Amino acid sequence: MKSIILEGCEKEINKFPDHVIDDFLDIVEQMENGLKLAPKISKRMQGIGLGVFELRLKDRNGIYRIIYFLKKAHAIYFIHGFKKKTQKTPKKNIDLARKRIRRIK
């Protein structure tokens, strides 16, 4: 399965610490090779839509999330990346992810 990182998401991810980006790229490679991710790394985001998940990355400085969308087993679209500052995902992040998903559907 191929992966596509949307331009806006790529800019957001590039703001993450280098070692978090490295972890993300390792996970992307695993996903492209068909490996199933552990629940502590990938979680379904039912509130956004079918086939939408979040990658859960962290380091000593924070918690990072990358929302992605699986489209018909053809591609993995990485939609939105952000540093999480609260327990609940902020509405602005959910709204932005929904908007970007609508553009690719």
Image: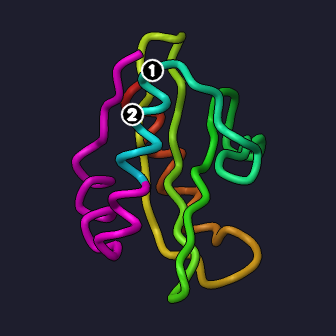
Quarter containing the C terminus: top left
Residue 89, by quadrant, is bottom right
Helix, strand or loop at mark 2: helix
Magenta range is: 1-23
Q: Does 97 appear above or below 1?
A: below
Tell whether position 22 is magenta. yes
Of residue 104 and residue 22, the one placed in the foreground of this image is: 22
Residue at x 31%, y 32% (from the top left corner):
4
Which residue is the site of mark 1? 33
At x 25%, y 65%, the residue is: 14
Q: Are marks 2 and 1 in contact (CB under 8 Å)?
A: yes
Give residue 72's position: percent from left, percent from top. Answer: 53, 11
Q: With 70 as the anchor, is 50 left or right in this view?
A: right
Image quadrant where residue 94 sits: bottom right
Drawn side of residue 45 relative to residue 53, left or right: right
Q: Tell me: 8 left or right of 74.
A: left
Local SS, label 1: loop
The 10 Å Cα crowd at callout 2, few under 14, some 14 to 19, many 20 or more, is some
Horizontal arrangement in the rendering, residue 24 relative to residue 5 (left or right): right
For the residue marked with disc 2, what is the amino acid?
Answer: Glu
Is 70 part of what is drawn in magenta? no
> How many angstroms separate mark 2 from mark 1 (CA)?
6 Å
Residue identified by numbered label 2 = 29
Residue for point 57% across, 25% down: 35
The answer to which quarter of the image holds residue 78 is: top left
Q: Which quadrant: the N terminus?
A: top left
